[in-house]
Amino acid sequence: MINVTQSFLPPMEEYIKHLEKIWASKQLTNHGPLVLELEDKLRQYLGVKHFFFVTNGTIALQIAIKALGLRNEVITTPFSYVATTSSLVWESCKPVFADIDPNTCTIDVASIEAQLNNKTTAILATHVYGNPCRVEEIQALADTHGLSVIYDAAHAFGVRYKGRSVLEFGDISTLSFHATKLFHTIEGGGVVTNNDELAHKIAYMRNFGHNGAEAFLGVGINGKSSEFQAAMGLCVLPHIPDLIRKRKAVSDLYTDLIEGLPLRKPELQIGTDQYNYAYFPVIFDTEAQLIKSIQFLNKNNIIPRRYFYPSLNTLNYVENNLAFDISTDISSRVLCLPLYDSLTADDVKLIVGVIRNAL
Ligand SMILES: *Cc1c(COP(=O)(O)O)cnc(C)c1O
């Protein structure tokens, strides 16, 4: 069977070496030596000022919303994973949807502008498939209207835009290190900021609000991760350049083979000077073609994923403020094809061949 993704597992001896350190330190969690080492290495690898390793990418979003004190309306993208929207609702904010750009699939800036009103407190946008949002235009809009900016950068590990980490844009960026993501810690996530004051808040918020053993700085939650998750991260991180290189080779082969088929890929944002090949999405001309292709693929034990479907403005716990939108249309026609480091050239040829037969 060929699944849409396959988690990378480092050689077991590498993980065991870290387990021996845990058995020696007897510290299993609460910012132990491996968590601190991973935070340090990720800060360097990603090239960011403040980085906090947390339980998962959803807690990362919730801490970001809380640290910025968001309330009322937050303008967000309907074309993302459900956690982008559900975190807002969970934190008592009202998601207001802006549409997406049909070419890049990231949030459309003119549409953000159209949704602004005096209740808007922030913009929460996703660097979808690792494709950077129009960060300068979003920041200009936020500055004009006094809004905070959060980027859900769950897909954007290692992505660089105009010579900088894409994580440097906005007030806070959040990452997911779930097993299905490019860089993973089994379960895990990260919160990134350049702002010292926000960093201080994030630090105590992820640890119950503690200020030492007996004092509290403010309200907090348990966003801590364990030494075992950090150990996986420390094992996976050195393999990342190689994993990205292999994913690029798979993506390039797909791109060659789908030429001439009625499929298109989202366009990479101009100015992206380092992409991470996190996903291989293709957009069909019609939903019927997509469904037929999935049926043909499944018959061959190939399991792609409708990612992202459905469009989040259609969730039953939000107000759908988009009537005839691009996001719902693209969601109905987009499919992520299998992409992982060990996918072979023969697998890719088989997958594209099956889709060719379906079309
Ligand atoms: C995976 C993902 C999340 C959630 O991250 P978890 O670590 O699974 O909680 C949030 N947003 C996006 C865009 C994601 O892809």
Image (tube, rainbow, N blue to C red):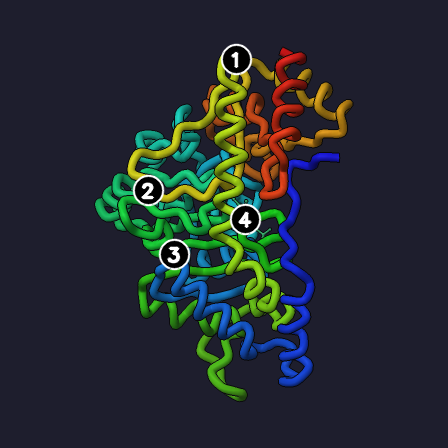
Identify whether 176 is placed above or below 106: below
Say which label, 3 or 2, has the lower sequence index: 3
Q: Considering depth in this image, is 312 or 284 the residue closer to the camera?
A: 284
**Mark 2: amino acid:** Asp
**Mark 4: amino acid:** Leu
Could you tell me if residue 39 is visible in this image? yes
Q: Which residue, given by chain and number where applicable, does mark 1 sit on?
A: 262
Say which label, 2 or 4, has the lower sequence index: 4
Label 1 element class: loop
Q: Which residue, given by chain and number where applicable, does mark 2 sit on?
A: 273
Q: Quadrant of residue 353?
A: top right
Residue 153 image offset from top left, x and y in percent: 45, 48
Q: Which residue, given by chain and number where applicable, does mark 4 sit on?
A: 182
Label 4 element class: loop
**Mark 3: amino acid:** Ile
Numbered disc in front, either 1 or 3? 1
Numbered disc in front, either 4 or 3? 4
Q: Which residue, given by chain and number where applicable, does mark 3 sit on?
A: 172
Mark 3 burial class by Cα count in 10 Å: few <14, some 14-19, many 20+: many
Using the numbered discs, state the Cα–Cα distance from disc 1 to disc 3 in whole angstroms: 38 Å
Q: Are marks 1 and 3 in contact (CB under 8 Å)?
A: no
* Residue 148 image label: none
Q: Are marks 4 and 1 in contact (CB under 8 Å)?
A: no
**Mark 1: amino acid:** Pro
